[in-house]
Amino acid sequence: MQLRLHAFDLPLAHTFTISRESISSQPTLIVELIQDGVSGFGEATSNKYYGFTVERMAGDLVGLQPQLEAARLEDPAALWSQCQPLLADDPFALCALDQAAHDLWGKLAREPVWKLWGLSIEKIPLSNYTIGIDTIDKMIVKMAEFADWPIFKIKLGTDHDVEIIRELREHTVATFRVDANCGWTADKTIEIAPQLEALGVEFIEQPLRADRLDDMQRVGAQCALPVIADESCITESDVAKCHQAGFRGINIKLVKCGGLTPARRMIAEARRLGLKVMVGCMTESSVGISAIAQLLPLLDYVDMDGAVLLAHDVASGVRLQRGRCVYPQAPGNGVSLLGAGRDPLTGKP
């Protein structure tokens, strides 16, 4: 296989704010694997919170080039097992490689990945659309741009969170989910959950800091709403810890766990423990979103609106229509790259 790397800066339609940062553009790395003249694509965005840059990911992947060039892709999971020890400290790069391997695998087999896994897309969850923290008036305007969307995820972590939800509720009958991104305490979570429930909130995502598992046990026992783990659930070993801590479900991020291969194992473990399962995005282009779409038949919830949040996409693939995933008539993950980007290490086109 040949390896090619493409770096892009993805401009957002609106500045996106969560409890710990604001961004207006998202750097991302696209991995291209080529075999028999066919290209598969995968993606991982940079992330300050977890310490991964496009340059770091690219450097780690270039180090694998000799092994990749000597290999032929037959099974993406086998390739993941071979590469994981070499990328143990860089799950973001491993994720992009694993996504590209699955896309290539499906394209070589001339079938969608979900079909090769033996799944059906007849019944799949709807995606929410995410509203970042802003003034209430601006949040209302952002929500009105997608007024027909059936589910909104509202980013919280302010000193007036209930007021935000109360005001937004005046403008839609859509289901609300709220995500505090570690911005609350246990006491605040327990205190405001009944008010949020009365305002049509379905669940709370990651209210406490990831290391506050003891406090989370109290929240799990006393909170009026289900609580879903995000920052507390990174790798496969975290699934059981989240169950023990009182979370009702987990939100799997492909970049954090290392791709589709470990994500499927995490889903199976969560099901064994009776947890709800969500997969979330990191403001990826359609490359990363199309990889998420392959998992939809296995999920209860999904947050795959990353490409919808962009001012300009760099790829084509699955798309969302009022929260419903529309799959392309294409094999693999269904991805096509629309431009070559720049070299992630030199910065040159």
Image (spheres, rainbow, N blue to C red):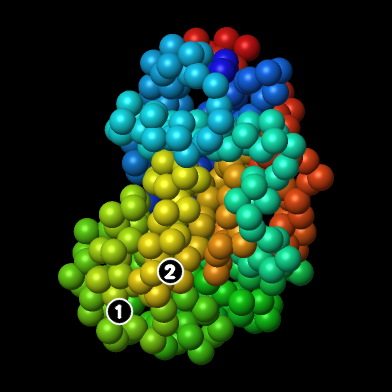
Asked if residue 113 is positioned above or below residue 248 in the image, the reply reads above
Residue 4 percent across, percent down from the top left: 57, 18
Q: Is residue 169 left or right of residue 156?
A: right
Answer few, some or many: residues within 10 Å of disc 1's Cα (few below 14, many 20 plus, some between 14 and 19): many
Residue type highlighted by circle 1 = Gly
Estimate the x, y position of residue 70 in percent, counting from the top left: 48, 13
User: Image check: 66 left or right of 49?
Assistant: right
Residue under the image location 46 percent in, 27 percent down: 54
Mark drawn on residue 271: 2
Tell me which corner region of the image, top left, top right, bottom left or bottom right, holds residue 286. Answer: top right
For residue 7, what is the image quadrant?
Answer: top right
Q: Is residue 285 above or below residue 224?
A: above
- Give the image location of residue 182, x and y in percent: 33, 61
Residue ID for mark 1: 220
Could you tell whether 9 is left or right of 146 in the image? left
Q: Is residue 307 visible?
A: no
